[in-house]
Structures are given as C-alpha cells and as structure tokens.
Amino acid sequence: MPETELYSERYRPQFHFTAGENWLNDPNGCVFDNGEYHLFFQHNPAGCEWGNMTWGHAVSTDLLHWQQLSNALTPYDGGTIYSGSAVVDSRNTSGFAHQASAPLVAAFTHAREPFGQAIAFSNDHGRHWEMYAEGRHVVPNQGLDSGERDPRIFWHAPTKRWVMALWVALGQVRFFVSDDLKQWVHTSDFMGEDFYECPDLFCLPLDGDGERPKWVLHDATSRYWVGDFDGVRFLPEAGPMTSDFGANFYAAQTWTNTGSRVVQIGWMRGGEYPGMPFNQQMSFPCELALRSTPAGIRLQRMPVAEIENLRAGADHTSNSALRAGEELVVSRSGDLFDIVAEIEAPRDAAFGIRLYDLEIACTGAGAVRCLGREASFVPSSDSVVRVRILLDRTSIELFVNDGEISMSFCFLPMDRETTVRCYVEQGNVWVRNWVVHHLSSVWGDPHTKKIELTGSSKT
C-alpha cells in the first residue's frame, strides 16, 4: 500500500500507536534518550499474523506523534527476538561507547530452544544496533522452563549496579545483578502466585512523598505486587492486585531514564481490524502513581498530560440534574474523544454513559461495568464519581476516580461517528461538570509516519 494511504484507513487508531503495516504485540525496550521516547515492539515484518518475531522501532518526542524507523533487532542463528528492555548506559559501564554519547543497551530473549538472554547496543541513539558477542547468551537458560524470557534491566542507584528481572517459570521471577551489563550473577527469586511473563519493576513515591518510596513488580496479565527492593531481593507487602480490569491490556512496560516520572504502555491484545494492512495496537501511554486508599495501597493509571495537545474543541455542560429515566446528550458526533466528567451520585443511584452501542454503567455504591467486565471502587466522601474516557476508532479506555480503576477494551464500531449521552437508571444524579474534548489525529503530519523499510541490526 502506498505510504500516502497509510494511517487514514477506516479502522486505523488515530491517537494510539500502530505499526504502519503487519503484526504488532508486546512493547519492548521502552527508554528515553536524547529527547526521544523509544518504543520497540514485537513485530512480524512479513505479515499480519504473529510470527518472525523482530523488534520493530518507533520514536516520539511527545508520546503522541510516532515515527516508525527501521527494524532494530532481527532473527539470527535459528532464533527469533522475543521481548525485553533497554537502558541508557550513561556511565559506559559496558564499555560499548564508541563516541561521546552514552550507548543504548537492549536485553532481549533469543527465542531458540532452550531460550536464553542476549544483549545488543547502539551508539547512534538507537538507529543502528550491534549484537554483543555475536548474540551469545549473557544469561543462559536456568533450566526451570525452556521458554524463560522477557529480561527487564534497570540501574539500581543505591547499590550502583544493574538489575535484571527475568521470568523463569509460572509464578517465579529470578533476579540478577551486573556491573557491566555483560556478566550477570543470580541473587534471589520471587515466588508470586501465577506470576506470568514480562516482569516490570519500578519505584514510585507513596502518595507523592519522596521519603516513602515503594517498589511495584508487575506482570503481563496486569497483576502487581507492592513492596521493597534492596537491589538483591524483592520483599512484597501487598498483592497481587490488578492494574487494569478490561479485556485488552497485556505485557505493559514502563519507560526507563525518565527521572521521577513513570510512564507505562501496553499491548491492547485481541483487537480486530478487518481489511487493514496492520494488526493490533498499543494502549495510550499512562502516568503511574501509588496511593493509599481505604482498601490499601493501589496503583493508579491516568493518561499522560501530553494528550491535551490533541484537543481540538470541546462540548461542555455543568450543573445539570438528572432523574431516573432521563438522558442528556452531552456532545455532537465524533469518533475521537477525551471525556472528563464529575457526577454526583448517591449510593442508591445508577447512571451510565452511552457511546455507539456501548454502555458504561456506574453506581454510586462503587461499581463500574463495560463490555462484560466489572470492577469495584471506593466511593468518595463527597459522592462524586470522576470518570475519564479515551475513545479512538477501535478502542475505549476508561479511568474511574483518578485512575483507581482502569479498563482497556478493543471494539469494532458499527458507525463512523457517535454522540455522547449520559443517562440515569436509578435515583437522581447531579452532573457537576462534563467536558467532551474532540481530539485531532496524530497522523496529520506526514513526517510523523515515515517508515524506513530497510533493516538496521548488525549481527
């Protein structure tokens, strides 16, 4: 398909990342370097179905507009390239730097039975990559599962060493440390009920208090544990909990080298895109926080603030009373929305939001339902339910009470556009404030959708 036709297709998401063509799944190697967010991803460059796993590559300066570059890491020596992570080696501990700038180092699973972990490096901000030791495994298979995979590496400042978290078996994560990213020593194991794939470990201040840091260990299925990490072992205090209650959020990863900001993106697994030149999409990037709630410590997810730069007009209503059976049309038609609402709903009230033929049902008692999934939240003391909805052409992401609950879904709309309606099923509600922001497409600038078709990894 000519480049001029890409990104304007009927079912192409307009503010979520998709590969220009062909298959996409897990985000890999998320790292911020030289003013760019790097997003690598599992990619089949040869077709729209899973296979030929390769690291696709895109960059962005704002987490919105992405430029897809040449594939970064390609299959070699009888094995494909499974998921992993990337860091900026600012101290050149690896010795890979060939020039003044710090090298990027990627750790990935070399998927050849039995799987092992290998690394590659780049000295030009991710444009070209070279395998270390011709791709030989720096962490061999541990003998616990032939498919051990998904190395998560990061710099642990207190101990001044690199750490790797590796999924080695169902319910088991193994930790390693290294001084140079090349030689790794096993330090401990974490045993977590049914922990599965794609470990991510990151630190967040509890309730925004930098004097109270906590560590979060997250798996591919949106479950997480909260505790302490001393550079050797992870000691859980709570968990497992769930970070996303929708049907289509998987294998999430946070960006490294972003300072105190923790930004997460996931694969929206299972979407359908009939007749499209691509298959699958990423979730919208979210900033994470860790909060104390009446139910305990919980991870909160909210869309990154950069989305405000896509807002292109809004429909607004406020101070409206609705009784059971009444409905309020909040917005004119559209297909790209960022909806922000505050609705006062007593515990005996039930209301909903209608988009296309979808209904998001909420109760003042603390329940939310969408597309066959349900989640519970703690009602606020002022009885206000705060709802945030991102609607793209093939996905809906729902956030309740500042991200206490998030739910991510893929769907196929029957129509091209929809209105936004609020309705009341039971009791009386008060719409304090409701803003429907219409969003512009991130693909409007042709420079953001450039695709280089030649490979760039060097084996």
Image (spheres, rainbow, N blue to C red):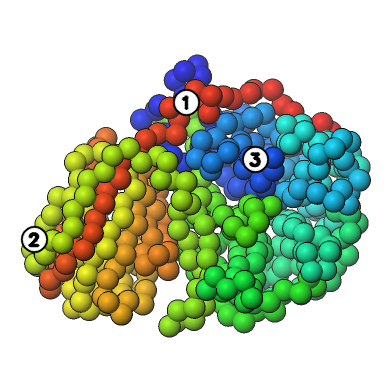
Q: Nearer the viewer, residue 282 or 180?
A: 180
- Tell me, for residue 445, which label it has, or none: 1
The residue carrying mark 2 is: 326
At 18% from the left edge and 58% from the top edge, which residue is drawn?
318
Tag 2 secondary structure: loop
35, above or below 202, in the image: above
Q: Nearer the viewer, residue 390 or 198?
A: 390
The residue carrying mark 3 is: 35
Who comes first in sequence, dot 3 or dot 1?
3
235, above or below 96, in the image: below
Q: Nearer the viewer, residue 458 or 145?
A: 458
- Tell me, for residue 30, which label it has, or none: none
Alpha carbons under labels 1 and 2: distance apart = 42 Å
At 61% from the left edge and 36% from the top edge, which residue is drawn?
58
Q: Nearer the viewer, mark 3 or mark 1?
A: 3
Residue 113 visible somewhere in the drawing: no
Residue 347 at x, y = what percent? 22, 79
Question: Is residue 107 found left or right of 237 in the rendered image?
Answer: right
- Figure quadrant of the C terminus: top right
Who comes first in sequence, dot 2 or dot 3?
3
Amino acid type of the residue that numbered disc 3 sits on in the rendered structure? Gly
294, above or below 358, in the image: below
Alpha carbons under labels 3 and 1: distance apart = 19 Å
Quarter occupied by residue 43: top right
Who comes first in sequence, dot 1 or dot 2?
2
159, above or below 451, in the image: below
Amino acid type of the residue that numbered disc 2 sits on in the rendered structure? Glu
At 72% from the left edge and 43% from the top edge, which residue is drawn?
81
Tag 1 secondary structure: loop
At 77% from the left edge and 59% from the top edge, which residue is drawn?
155
